[in-house]
Image: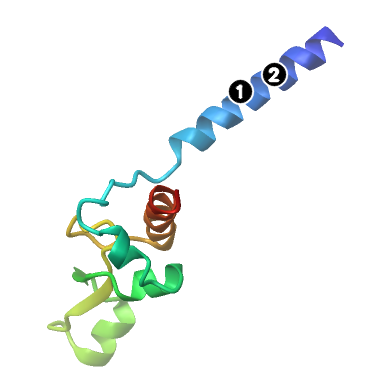
Amino acid sequence: MKRLLLLLTFFLSSTTFYAIAEKPKTRDISHLISKEEFITYKDVADFIDKSPKVTINISPSKDDVDEYGRQVLKSLTGSDCDRDGKMDDNPTCNAVFYKLWLKYSL
């Protein structure tokens, strides 16, 4: 029984550490977005939609090169929710919105 408890404790502590290590880092951007501006967003989707856009170049796939030739350029445009000049993924945008929501809902 002690061995099972020890094993369970180790598993839970290592899982918790892993979960903490994997959380996306978000910047506090409340100095960039006031409470008055934040409350104008209907929801997180509206926040993401109205965030600044960033375009990055990516490598074209083999199919792109076959269809359009070697000189093809490919890019993606996405949202910069934390205003750091880099495209953010959905979990990062959600985290930024949630952080602002916590700050301004008090």
Q: Which residue is mark 2?
A: 9
Measured as percent of width and height from the top left, residue 18 is found at: 52, 33
In the rendered view, would you say 9 is above or below 59? Answer: above
User: For numbered disc 1, what is the local secondary structure?
Assistant: helix
In this picture, residue 50 sits left or right of residue 21: left
User: For numbered disc 2, what is the local secondary structure?
Assistant: helix
Confirm or deny contact between disc 1 and disc 2 (CB under 8 A).
yes
Q: Which residue is mark 1?
A: 13
The mark found on residue 30 in the picture is: none
Q: Residue at x 27, y 56 (%)?
A: 82
Measured as percent of width and height from the top left, residue 99 is found at: 40, 50
Label 1 sits on what residue type? Answer: Ser
Q: Residue furthest right?
A: 1
Q: Residue at x 39, y 53 (%)?
A: 104
Measured as percent of width and height from the top left, residue 103 is found at: 39, 48
Q: How dense is the environment of label 1, judged by Cα within 10 Å: few (below 14), some, or many (20 and up)?
A: few
Q: Quadrant of residue 7?
A: top right
In this picture, residue 12 sits left or right of residue 90: right
Measured as percent of width and height from the top left, residue 58 is found at: 23, 70
Quarter the N terminus occupies = top right
Q: Quadrant of residue 86?
A: bottom left
